[in-house]
Amino acid sequence: MAGVLSTAALPTGAKSLPTNPDVVIIGAGSAGIGAARRLMAEGRSVLVIEAANRIGGRAFTDTDTFGVPYDQGCAWLQGPRSIPHVDVIDRMGFTKVNHNLADEAFYVDGRLANFDEKSAYERAQSALYDDIWGKGDVAAADVIRDRRFMPAALTWTTMGHAVDMDALSTADVNAYAEYEVNYLVKEGLGSIVQELGRDIPVKLNCAANAIDWSGEGVTVETTDGAIKAAACIVTVSTGVLASGAIRFTPDLPVEKQEAVSDVPMGLFTKIALQFDGERFGLTDNNWLSYDVPKEQTGQGCYFVTWPTGTDLAVGMLGGDHAWDVTSKGADVAIDLALETFAGLVGNDARKHFIKGHMSDWHTNPHTLGAYSAARPGRFAARDALKAPLGRRVFFAGEAVAVPLAGLCSGAHLSGEATADVVHAVLSVDGGCGSCDARGQAKQKLQEVSE
């Protein structure tokens, strides 16, 4: 994680597009950007191809819909303090909010919870993870005991992991690392990722259709022609891999195909509601939730209120509930979120409502979901998914970013780690000058492989 160059330190003229790069990277999201920066710092030529018309992937700060920065995708910068995103925030003078300090307005029977109810709710949240801790690799639903307000706590977990408890591996939960930072960024997390990718050679609107790894190097067939390279890093989501949008020659080994199936995409959907400045007694950067009936566990719509001082209440859905609601369209989703919000703070909310927006990761062809979740009993598939093909095709992204899977920071660090492996492999296989240099590359390859 250490020693990452700042954007300003990258080679000048990096935007020129090489025709025969050392490495072609598929996807200009956080993983692709992390990999490209690392390889460029090592003197490797890279070309990143991106099917969309922008870089950033699931890190997307939209400034048009509401006239303020709004992260349609990942919004929380969580992970180690050493990630380069923190340097960008400081260098650019961006405003960050420590979201570890967030409070929560918790409603019971249409009113704010009293002290005893709030305490019982907090005990349920703590007990949930006590139940899951050390339980191997089984469905979370099988180990969580029933308690008062547990359905409300589980609804948060469904949102956080993007799947319901019967589809969530306890190993997936237990693998997550503690965060050194947990920031909301007023200018948007997507803006930070854009800045990190500013000097990287990226070809937009260029989708990969096929990867031929049968020869000495690789050939990537794209919508804009073929690209030959010594190696390829694939950073697309498991949803895209499972769709068959990219053909492999030879075919993906059976164990790789099974790994893709065993780490499918879950869904976390945002429904942002814009108001006219009325706060309804709610404070900036805090959570808004409520008691959920047991039979509706996982089916709530919770909120972040007025993030970084905006006039937005950002509703959130997770798991099967998110798939169901979003399948009915944005209007239905916005109505549901507004009805839920007004049911908590009062019907006056409707008079102050301006407009809403629903994120579309469920239908976005470049993601086909929000982020990955290992199936119960299949946590090891994350490692199988990461395994390279023939020392030529490598895989990076949030799906293989244990212990930060599902996170923007995890995807970036996964890209960096994969780039280290690729650089070491190319140095050994293709030669890198002196015998001492080749020896150092072999040692590095052994280290990163372990």
Image (spheres, rainbow, N blue to C red):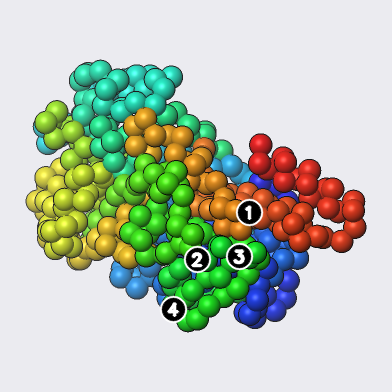
Q: How many marks?
A: 4
Task: Tell me the amino acid under the disc marked 1.
Answer: Arg
Mark number for residue 223?
A: 4
Q: Residues within 10 Å of mark 1 (few under 14, many from 20)?
A: some
**Kind of element beneath mark 4:** loop
**Kind of element beneath mark 2:** strand
406 or 83, which is in the foreground?
406
Mark number for residue 211?
A: 2
Q: Earlier in the sequence, mark 4 or mark 2?
A: 2
Q: Residues within 10 Å of mark 2 (few under 14, many from 20)?
A: many
Residue 408 visible in this rendered orientation of the protein:
no
Question: Which residue is drawn at the image coordinates 63% and 54% (left, top)?
Answer: 391
**Kind of element beneath mark 3:** loop
Q: Are marks 1 and 2 in contact (CB under 8 Å)?
A: no
**Kind of element beneath mark 1:** loop
Q: Are marks 4 and 2 in contact (CB under 8 Å)?
A: no
Question: Which residue is drawn at the image coordinates 66% and 55% (left, top)?
Answer: 422
Q: Earlier in the sequence, mark 4 or mark 3?
A: 3
* Closer to the eye: label 1 or 4: 1
Choose top left, top right, bottom left or bottom right for residue 216: bottom right
Residue 395 visible in this rendered orientation of the protein:
yes
* Closer to the eye: label 1 or 3: 3
Instruction: Give the Cα separation between the discs numbered 3 and 2.
Output: 11 Å
Question: Residue tagged by mark 1?
Answer: 391
Measured as percent of width and height from the top left, residue 14 is found at 67, 75
Q: Residues within 10 Å of mark 3 (few under 14, many from 20)?
A: few
Choose top left, top right, bottom left or bottom right for residue 365: bottom left
Task: Tell me the amino acid under the disc marked 4.
Answer: Thr
Question: Which residue is drawn at the image coordinates 55% and 62% (left, top)?
Answer: 213
Measured as percent of width and height from the top left, residue 257 is found at 40, 49
Q: Earlier in the sequence, mark 1 or mark 3?
A: 3
Q: Earlier in the sequence, mark 1 or mark 4?
A: 4
